[in-house]
Amino acid sequence: MRREVITAIVLGFVLGLLITGGIWWTTKSSQSDVSDQSSDVSLTPSPSPTEFLSKEIPLKINEPENESIVEVASVELKGETLSHAVVVIIYSEGENIVESDDKGNFESTISLKGGANEIKVTVYDEKGDKREEIITLVYSTAKI
Amino acid sequence: MIYKFKTSNLKFQMFLLILGSLVVYSFWAGNAILAQEESTQASQEKEESIRREVEAIVRDNKQILGDELEVKRAFCGNLKSRDLEVNTLVMETNKRDKTITYDDETVFLSISRNKVKADDLELGSFVIAMGYANRLSPGSLVAKRVVVQETPVPIVRQSFFGEVDDISEEEKVFVLVPKKGKEVLEIIADEATIKRQESGKVKKAQFSDIVKGDKVVLVGKKDKNDNRIEAVLIYILSSEK
């Protein structure tokens, strides 16, 4: 009788271990599946809808910012667009045509008249497609 | 008797088996719950610590950020409305309406540069409001100086892109074929500055440098005839284009 009891306890212990081990293994593998799926999602971000929609020529005027107050009559306009694109800058006192460099950066000196100055910047790509931006600068030496 | 003993012994063994399993499982489950609670508590403490650090950084930099967000700006446009009770003007600009607020220190100047008051400003007049705007609310400005100015003459010059077709050397006129679907233009270039790019540098060129098939970008203004352009600047694109 005593031998049988010991056998039952050992068997129960082993069986219990097998059951709990099985549960633990199942839980762990399902967790790792979920984390794998989530890491897949984070590693391969899906393109945003705007990436498909925006086929517009990029154009950003970095300096001077729109609606800036400029205290000198001549200012360096800097921006970025496609590389080797033609950039036309038209302002009240004149016009310039420049080409952007390998990185798409461009710059041009423009002269301003006192007061409000509208500056029209147009970029053409090699096919002749264009993108236009207009900024307004105010040339004033008055202290604000 | 032997049979009974075996049957009861078997039941007893089954009972012990189940009991043993339950004991082990309960022990494991208890440990697992304890571990989870400890980990949740630890992550909450970490989260709280990070939040405190971020709050401290934000507090320290609030003043600096505030200073950087305030920028000198000038809004230009036609005066659309004014509310003298709340010291506010609304200006119509190219893109959208902008709000100007002012105080007793704001200087108002008429078109003849005389000091005036806010209620002297005529609706519809072109004004330049100079002051400070916040980058987070670019549609409003706290004005320090408001100046009335003649409405600027719109720029009539435009840019054009296309390929050169027929050329008249004598008249300094050529035909420009823009992109497909657009009308052919006649370019008058007798007073135009002509430039071209040679080995990475922009050089002045002559009318005779323009040849049929060249791609050009030019600036000019439309004549009374919409298809005729008086060019002021012509840029001959490099052969790679």
Image (cartoon, coloured by chain):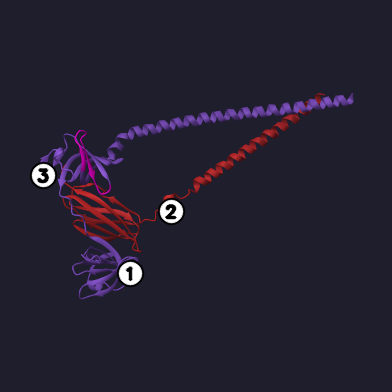
Q: Which residue is mark 2?
A: A52
Which chain is home to disc 2?
A
Is circle 3 on the same chain as circle 1?
yes
| Tag 1–tag 2 contact (CB < 8 Å) | no
Left or right: A35 with respect to B109? right
Which quadrant would residue B221 be assigned to in this image?
bottom left
Whether tag 3 and tag 1 are in contact, CB under 8 A, the answer is no
Instruction: Say which mark, if any, is on residue B239.
Output: 1
Residue type marked 1 = Ser
Pick the front one: B91 or A87:
B91
Residue occupying the point 27% across, 37% down: B67
User: Badge 1, how many Cα within 10 Å: few under 14, some, many 20+?
Assistant: few
User: Where, quadrant-wise, is the N terminus of chain B in this rendering?
Assistant: top right
Is residue B87 within the magenta segment? yes
The residue tagged 3 is B113
Dot in front, 3 or 1: 3
Q: Given the current orientation, which residue lies at the most extreme right position?
A: B1
Instruction: Tell me where residue B154 appears, x and y as whole percent.
Output: 20, 55
- In the displayed structure, would residue B75 be above or below residue A3? below
Asked which quadrant contains residue B2, the reply is top right
Q: How many other residues sit within 10 Å of disc 2, few (<14), some (14-19) or many (≥20)?
A: few
Structural distance between the alpha carbons of marks 3 and 1: 53 Å
Colour red maps to chain:
A
- Which range of residues does the magenta coloring cover? B80-95
